[in-house]
Image (spheres, helix red, strand yellow):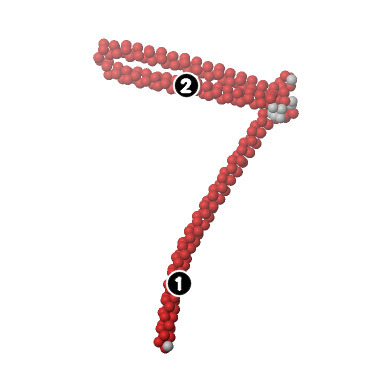
Amino acid sequence: MAGECHSIGSQSPVAKQFILENASPSTRLLEKRRQMFEVQEALELQKQEFARKEEILRKREEALKKKDLELQESLIRFSKFLQENDSKRARADKKAADEVKSRQQKEKEIEQLTEVLEQLREEKEHVHDVLEKYMQYQRYLESVLESADEYQEIQDLLLRHATLQATNDDLRAHQLHSAAEAEEIRVALQAFTKQKMDEILNLNNKLSQLKKQLESYEQQAAQQELKKDYSLRVASQRTLEYGQVVL
């Protein structure tokens, strides 16, 4: 089995892919582990490279600090020299300014090197964190493969996850579409209800007007009936009186 895995590692990428596709699950798992070992080995080499660069920067920083101390001591000695020899003051001032400028430049270089060192440290931590996450994810996928018979390859598990994600996206889209349709129906129903309520209100107003007209007609008819009865009584009385006169 180890010979088979070693043989796979020495093949070209195309041949390696072909062999892996036709190899047994245990062989493919060994190949994955070999790849993880190569990644870990590359990380270790990178750690060593970071350590080497860090040591170089540290030594340069110490050398610059030592140089700065020497410059300060030189400035002190030069200041004493200025006090002892006024005739050389003009030349000494220029030299002092150059020394100060050089010291400031060295201090700036120290700051820059310190920033570079800090960036390298942050980059090293970032690479370590990324690799650690990758290794955790790799271990998780391998544990899933060992416990799930239906998945023989990590790619199968990722494909299943992608399918479930697509299905979930479709369901969300359908839910949003259904919600939009429901909102349209609600708005239409609200408009229809308002329209019918307005129609009912208009009909109630018309019915109230018709009732008032009917009451008015009934009152007029009652008054006409009273007038008719009165006219009949008057006519009957007059007829009776006329008959009595004739007799």
Q: SS of the residue at dot 2?
A: helix
Residue behind mark 2 = 118
Q: Quadrant of residue 95?
A: top left
Q: Position of residue 128 (x, y in %)?
A: 55, 22
Q: Quadrant of residue 167?
A: top right
Q: Position of residue 104 (x, y in %)?
A: 37, 20
Return the residue nearer the eye: 58 or 134: 134
Counting other residues with Cα less than 10 Å from the Cα at mark 2, is it few (<14), some (14-19), or many (20 or more)?
Answer: few
Q: SS of the residue at dot 1?
A: helix
Q: Position of residue 49 (x, y in %)?
A: 55, 19
Return the residue nearer the eye: 153 or 63: 153
User: In the visual, does 55 lie left or right of 23?
Assistant: left
Give the residue type that dot 1 points to: Ala
Q: Residue furthest bottom?
A: 246
The answer to whether one can see residue 141 in this image is yes
Which residue shows up at 45% across the image and 22% down it?
115
User: In the visual, does 76 lie left or right of 30?
Assistant: left
Which residue shows up at 61% across the image and 19% down it?
41
Q: Of circles 1 and 2, which is in front?
A: 1
Return the residue nearer the eye: 237 or 131: 237
Q: CA distance from mark 1 to mark 2?
A: 110 Å
Residue 138, above or below 81: below
Residue behind mark 1 = 221
Q: Position of residue 160 (x, y in %)?
A: 66, 33
Q: Residue furthest front?
A: 247
The answer to whether one can see residue 195 in this image is no
Q: Counting residues from the N terminus, which is met first, the one under dot 1 or under dot 2? A: 2
Q: Quadrant of residue 8?
A: top right
